[in-house]
Amino acid sequence: MFKINENYLKLPGSYLFSTIAKKVAAYKAENPDKTVISLGIGDVTLPLAPAVISRLHSAVDEMAVKETFRGYAPDLGYEFLRSAIVKNDYLARGAQIAIDEIFVSDGAKSDSGNIGEIFSVDNRIAVCDPVYPVYVDSNVMAGRAGDYLPDQGKFSNVIYMPCTAENNFMPALPEETPDIIYLCFPNNPTGTTIPKAELQKWVDYALEKGAVIIYDAAYEAYISEDDVAHTIYECEGADRCAIELRSFSKNAGFTGTRLGFTVIPKALKCGDVSLNSLWARRHGTKFNGAPYIIQAAGETVYSPEGQAQTKEMVAYYMENAAAIRAGLEAGGYTVFGGINAPYIWMKTPDGMSSWDFFDYLLKGANVVGTPGSGFGPHGEGYFRLTAFGSHESTQEALARIRSL
């Protein structure tokens, strides 16, 4: 008889955002007269930039003409997009990344879940706590996380690095030695980040220990402070120890069109084996490329018009973040984030649990957020709100919350 991957059975419950969706759907069904405002999932709401839409239309027209029709994309992605990425995201910041070190994909979530395939199951991972659930869940599925410990809300073979108000949500270098370190800055869910000098310490640590850093930079477009790195490759030696994940979802609104990329420098090796070559083999075997029309639109993000228009989108969401932060603080809440990221991380009032506060907001204010405990044990007692709504819905949600 066939057998299943029993590692899936170790996952507690369903995926965090699936659970939230079910609870909200049930509430709406029971209360059809209520208007629910979601500040929960990190999905954008503004339409794609005009320059991007224009390029999508022209790319679709190209697909209707024999001479300009495109079939399968090249394994690593079209050269026109990878060249634009190298020029604007790396060379412009002094990072010497080459075009053949860029792998275009359908999004950072896919890559963050799949990147573990090029590593042995015997590797031990370290994650911030709280953390984006995909990092841990994908390693559970691979059999790398050990057993779930219900009384601790942890997995036995994962090194958890607490990020709390007491340490300004900056993880300390772990005492136990990890093989793979997941870092996300600006951070999801806390909305906080670390100075470039602190990030350099992580690079130095990884080089010393022989570890690799999986660096999620999906929110780099929201950075507003000068001392924060936009890419880990601004740090000396990062090309020898770090893989960077990037997304077009949050900076350019591609959540519904799906586009991202992963950077693996050729200098990053395990002994004599290049991780770049391993990911190229995996990419070519299991992925047939992001659609031409989407990659063409992605290139337009780097055009002068595209850059100006997407910056306006980012600024719009950060106006929401500032409003949420200021409004909650005025209401007596303790809040973090919202300066270099579109997330606000708030402390639940009166010692309420994260899920109790979720229910309290949903039923009392018809507002949806994300319980902090869904991101890890140290997320308990916190709650995440996103800035991706409209100005109007954000202000209405704030008014409802403060009325409680």
Image (cartoon, rainbow, N blue to C red):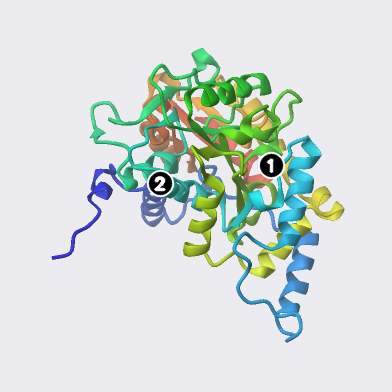
Q: Position of residue 16 (x, y in %)?
A: 39, 44
- Is 285 situated left or right of 14 in this image? right
- Residue at the top extreme of this rendering: 166
Q: Is residue 174 left or right of residue 320?
A: left
Of labels 2 and 1, earlier in sequence is 2
Q: Residue at x 85, y 54 (%)?
A: 305
| 41 vs 144, nearest the viewer | 144
Residue 75 falls in image quadrant: bottom right
Residue 152 visible? The answer is yes
x 68%, y 31%: residue: 322
> Badge 1, how many Cα within 10 Å: few under 14, some, many 20+?
many
Mark 2 lies on residue: 20
Question: Element type at marker 2?
Answer: helix
> Circle 1 sits on which residue?
317
Q: Amino acid at mark 1?
A: Tyr
Mark 1 residue element: helix
Q: Residue furthest bottom?
A: 66
Q: Residue at x 39, y 36 (%)?
A: 374
Residue 7 appears left or right of 254: left
User: In the image, what residue type sits under mark 2?
Assistant: Ile
